[in-house]
Amino acid sequence: MKKWLPILLSGAIGLGAISVPASVNAAGGFMDVKADHWARSAIESAASKGYFKGYADGTFKPNATLTRAEFAATLARLSKVGATDTTEKVFADLSGHWSETEVNRAVTLGFIDPKDYPNGFKPNTPITRFEIAKWMTSGLAAIDGDYKQALEDTKTTVIPVKEYFTPGIPESKAPYVAVAMGTKLLGGYPDGTFGLNSNATRAEASTILLRYESVSGKKADEFLGLKELRQVGTERTNMETISPFTTKHNSFNNVVEKNYTLRNNAGSLKLHNYIVIDTQDFKNIESIYAQLFIGKNSKVAWIDKKGMYTVLFQITIYPKTNNFGIGHYINGVKDSLILGSRMNSASLSNKYGYLTLPNENIEQFFRDHQDRDGGVTVWAQRYIDYDNVIGQLTTDDNSFISIFTKE
């Protein structure tokens, strides 16, 4: 048994639950956590470790919300890192509250930033999933400088959740969500959302705490998803993380956000992101971006072979000619790297709220979706063949990039 566990057990009553006799668990777990409950294993494991207690009536109340004080206290006890005890009153509204000592410890450990709560901690407020993401990733950053750097690297990354596209996740919040997802501390919901403002339940917290226990013992570069998110955040592509392709000594930063005039003068475009997904085996796609772009209709027979990779790239098209259509785009692009087609799984674009190239009412589409600068931002799809790598782009200012296979 780990030395820090008795400390955790001694304070578990502070979570508001009453210790349950051992016979309750021995008889088959908590009364309200059925055999087919999605979090049963995590709940029972978290309870056995002392992170949570059941109630006197033999229930766990898996759907009950968790308060800030409860989660902060649990994190403080869970952490294996030593922290200097402090008698400083960090939050005035915690004076005399059962969680004051443990919340202060969570602050000292780097989980909680007092500046986030200028009007008081309000300990009985149900905690949100964003708060959990921020507290946990901040705790990781406090003990490992690479996690701190990961928070910097992911400020402008593409995050595979619906809120990233609509209404958007501000840069002040994005890195905490990104690192939480990249390490699998938290994931999205089936509807594609992250649920930044959703309240976490005791069942969710049980699962998350066990994940944190595992993640805190690993280095940031051990998580493929986090490596992808970091590369996209710093280089606008995950290519070298997920595939055998490289830009050698160049970088996508050379060409992104730069003007590219279509050779037919029908308009221009700008490249924003270039996401590569290893789709050689559709039964085993590991990329964190697969859920965002690869659906049941994404598999195409002629690309189902070793060495074929799917690319999803984000561009903004600025139509110039009247009645701009797909033909103007296809015939106007001379560089293969940004020549693409409509995504095969359009249902995913509807689910997550991003646009892909249209296949009907095309002229109306470009009229309806123009932003204030007259641009239409879409995601397009293409493929890269390991045996026949073709990909280059030269922008109007002669900035250049090419794709090669790694040596």
Image (cartoon, grey):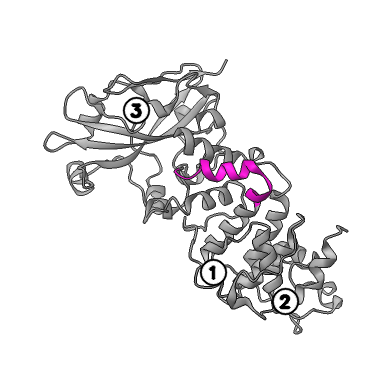
Identify the residue at image location x=56%, y=50%: 181
Q: Nearer the viewer, mark 3 or mark 2?
A: 2
Residue 193 placement (x, y as % from top left): 47, 57
Q: Name the residue under label 3.
A: 338
Q: Mark 2 points at which residue?
A: 14
Compared with 376, 45 (above or below) is below
Q: Is mark 1 on a helix, strand or loop?
A: loop
Quadrant in which the N terminus appears: bottom right
Residue 174 placement (x, y as % from top left): 48, 51
**Magenta segment, which residues?**
140-156
- Farthest residue, direction left: 322
Tell me the amino acid under the disc marked 1: Asn
Q: Is residue 99 left or right of residue 234?
A: right
Q: Is the magenta stretch mostly helix, strand or loop?
A: helix
Q: Mark 1 points at which residue?
A: 199
Tell me the amino acid under the disc marked 2: Gly
Q: Which of 82 and 74 is in front in this view?
A: 82
Identify the residue at image location x=81%, y=70%: 9
Quadrant in which the C terminus appears: top right
Based on the picture, tell me whether residue 400 belongs to the magenta stretch. Answer: no
CB under 8 Å between discs 2 and 1: no
Earlier-in-chain disc, 1 versus 3? 1
Earlier-in-chain disc, 3 versus 2? 2
Residue 366 placement (x, y as % from top left): 21, 43
